[in-house]
Image: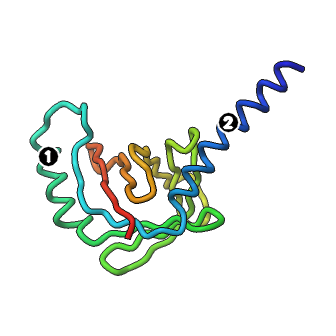
Amino acid sequence: MRYFLFLCLCTALASCGSGKANALLQHKKWKVYDVTAPPGDPYNLVQITQAKDLKDGYYSDVFYQFLDNGLFIATIAGKPDSGRYELLSNGKVISVTASGGSRKAEHLVEVTRLNENEFDMKVLSGDYHFILHTRKQ
């Protein structure tokens, strides 16, 4: 019985973190304003150059939106694309999948900062991790 109560408490605490993260993410338009190498990564000139190229190129006009029922919209250069999202690990990781929810094309995004106005995420692009810095619009 104690184990069951402990398990219920752990589940409730874990869902509180996910719920708070979801409330902070939802119903906002998050615009990418910077792309950097993650702090703590060893210095790598190729990674630094790619971060600058991504900021000035691919991510120069990108918005993300997290809506009700796990709907995720990425707008890139004015063209929207939708998928599904799910918060994992107490809101510290976001699973982004295709519209059907298939995990065959799952992207895991690590939340590095999230508050009312800023959302930074660690993503894998090619061979390197990058931090996408976004602001609420």
Q: Which mark is residue 130?
A: none
Quarter residue 3 falls in: top right
29 is higher (above) or lower (below) than 12? below
Residue behind mark 2:
13
Quarter residue 10 falls in: top right
Q: Residue at x 58, y 67 (%)?
A: 71
x then y, percent, for residue 77? 30, 77
CA distance for labels 2 and 1: 38 Å
125 is higher (above) or lower (below) than 40? below
Name the front one of labels 2 and 1: 2
Q: Residue at x 61, y 62 (%)?
A: 70
Q: Residues within 10 Å of mark 2 (few under 14, many from 20)?
A: few
- Where disc 1 sits, the SS reads helix
- Residue farthest to the front, as pictured: 116
Q: Amino acid at mark 1?
A: Ile
x then y, percent, for residue 84? 57, 62
Residue behind mark 1:
48
Front residue of 4/98: it is: 4
Q: How is the image coloured?
A: rainbow
x then y, percent, for residue 98? 53, 63
